[in-house]
Amino acid sequence: MSGGVDSSTVAAMLRAEGHNVIGLTMQLWNQRRLAGHEGMPESVQGRCCSLDDVYDARRVAQQIGIPYYVVNHEERFERDVVRPFVEEYLSGRTPIPCSLCNNHLKFDQLLIVAQQIGAGRVATGHYARVAYDDARGRWLLKRPADLSKDQTYFLFGLTQKQLSRTLFPLGDMTKPQVRELAHRHALAIAEKQDSQEICFVPGGDYKRFIDAYLAEQGESLPDTAGDLVTTSGEVIGEHAGIHNFTVGQRKGLGVSTGSPLYVIQISGANKQVVVGGGEHLYSRTLRAKRVNLISIADLSEPMRVAVKIRHRHEPAPATIERAGTDEILVRFDEPQRAITPGQAAVFYDGDMVVGGGWIS
Amino acid sequence: MHRVYLDNNATTPVLPEVFEAMRPYFSERFGNASSIHHHGQETRAAVEDARESVADLLGCSASEIVFTSGGTESDNLAIAGWVAAGDHVITSSIEHHAVLHACKHLEKIGCEVTILPVDGRGLIDPGDVRRALRPNTKLISVMMANNETGVLQPVGEIGKIAAEARILFHTDAVQAAAKVPIDVRQIGCDALSVSGHKIHAPQGVGALYVKKGTRIQPLFHGGRHERSRRAGTENVPGIVGLGKAAQMANAAFDRGDDKKMFAMRDRLEQGILAQVDEAGVNGAGATRVPNTTNIHFDHIEGESLVIALDLKGLAVSTGAACSSGAIEPSHVLIAMGLRPDQARASIRFSLGKQTTDADIDFALALVPETVARLRALSPKYNSQVKVVS
């Protein structure tokens, strides 16, 4: 329970259905920790794990009459989400901490706690559907009724075991319906705003966060400054560090030419940022590593799917095939814009998640 | 659900006799103890009766008792009431946050603070206290009994060192009062903190013993209540409750109830250790108050154990809750040298006057099976088992 409208409504729904419900909030990050450091905002209101949110979650639990506990997973969160987040940026990739959190915290640590305290399932406020398919003998992850809220992209890492113990009660509902239900249960948080950004990066300024985090850790920001080069290899300027860039970025390159320039590629090895015209951003293939398959046990022959390469991306038709152990080659029918290392490639067959992997 | 409460170091239920003693002071005996009329005289008498009862519990005279809002205020009054910028204060790493954070605040206003370590049993070495003395040392604040382990500190020896050096000595006796006999003269302290709700009086009342002849700066400025040591109209019902609880604690010592509690605690402790392997008592080598046992159950998260037990009706606790309610590894257990994972795997059981043999039976039936279930589901424990086999 995050204290937001989705997880609160899930708790109220399940309780009303007569389930034996236990409310849990994961304390993942101390929002006060970096406040005021290195230009980080002094006040961080309405962020996850803030006292206000825990207060809201606890009040909902009290109102609907369920036991409620806060479980501390700050150490694991820092190790498995925050650290990799910082390191990915410093290596020139663009990470997705929400997927890491789902894989390592919400559907791993939290599931263990749930089992330990005698709970058979974990229900969350994610917009997704989970169902068992008898014919396949597998648990399936499916896109929700409200496609504008679809969170399956962040859930591609769930294993069969995790899915078998998971409930997504909001999968068949739209957000307005959820808010209406929250009102019907008279939950005080019914009109609370949705969280949009990365929960531990207030204001979304990840560069400032990296500076503040490394300073707090007593580590200096590694020097990742280097050359700005064109796609033909010509050096046209310098940049202050590769972590300031993401593939497809146009603003803040520090050079001006006649035609618009974009970041085409970031090379961690030689600290180069490759820039070029928009046409260079398009690519027909990608390689996904650390693959997790959901609807199928194995990918033995090429398969037609639609592939989503970032959260806000319309799945594009493609063929996937195995390209080695734990690696899948994706060939798009049409070139795709700004395929970004560090993001996930998630494969869909209709509304069903086939699987996914990390773009390398 | 049948519920058993073994978290009496957090708070205790108000005993029925205590509640009955307090009852008239909420309504029919409502006077302000400072008023000169009948109503004031009535409550003044009650406050002074209570003061004598608390003085009896601590072995001091009534005029040396200051009523406060609780243990935290008593600790803060003793510390802030004596120390000013430039002074040096000695305390320990296992103090309650009421003392530890009060001392941290002193650092911000220009004081020097020495925080003494403890050994593996959770004991402070009086020799360390002596060695920490400086020409500008003003105050030593070392607790009498630790809230998490129940370990009793050598406060008598520290009192002697303080007296020889002519330094003020405060002891936080919140977890010792009513559990072991207290005699402030024997301890040789200048101030001693007591909390009402840890001894079956209500929350929101406490007391500070301040030795006669030692002037203390009040925390609040206002009327001349409590001989100008604590401004504010007295919490009369609370004070009456504290007085009654102190009286009952004295009577309980006379009956030898503390010996019975020792026996009950030991039955719980030994019963658990007999059924659970890879577990042990934190502070086992030291003398402890009779109501507390703190046990580490290796390879589990204490947090999950507390939740699992609560859902089955047994209330116990682990570590210290942070402001969100999440649990942080105990600073006390870490100071004793436990590994962070062992500190997180530790659970405190604390008995109260209402605890029965049936309560202990309930805990003995529930705890071992719950630990076993948690371990069966713990990746840490299973990887350990694989290594062993």
Image (tube, coloured by chain):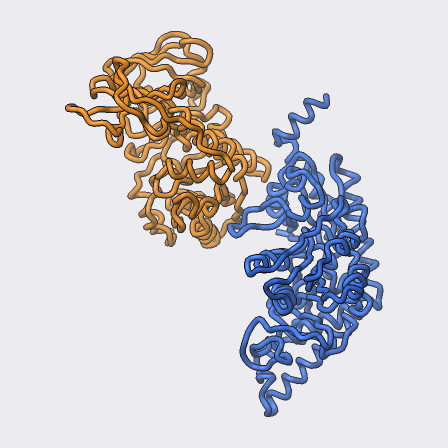
Measured from the top left, where is residue B182 in percent x and y? Answer: 79, 66
Question: In the image as oriented, which residue stretches furthest toward the top?
Answer: A301
- Position above or below: B214 against A316: below
Relative placement, left or right, of B296 versus A61 is: right
Q: Quadrant of residue B229?
A: bottom right
Q: Is residue B20 visible?
A: no
Question: In the image as oriented, which residue stretches furthest toward the front?
Answer: B135
- Locate the C terminus of chain B by quadrant: top right
Residue drawn at point x = 58 percent, y = 38 percent: A118
Measured from the top left, where is residue B142 in percent x and y? Answer: 71, 58
> Which residue is at the front of the view, A253 or B204?
A253
Residue drawn at point x = 69 percent, y = 60 percent: B141
> Which residue is at the front of the view, A243 or A59?
A243
Q: Is residue B185 visible?
A: yes
What color is chain B drawn in?
blue
- Tell me how many marks there are: 0
Q: Quadrant of residue A169?
A: top left
> Which residue is at the front of the view, A189 or B111?
B111
> Which residue is at the front of the view, A325 or B221?
B221
- Position above or below: B69 against A352: below
Measured from the top left, where is residue A87 in percent x and y? Answer: 45, 28
Measured from the top left, where is residue B107 in percent x and y? Answer: 58, 57
What color is chain A drawn in?
orange
Q: Quadrant of residue B103?
A: bottom right
Question: In the image as oriented, which residue stretches furthest toward the left?
Answer: A258
Question: In the image as oriented, which residue stretches furthest toward the bottom?
Answer: B37
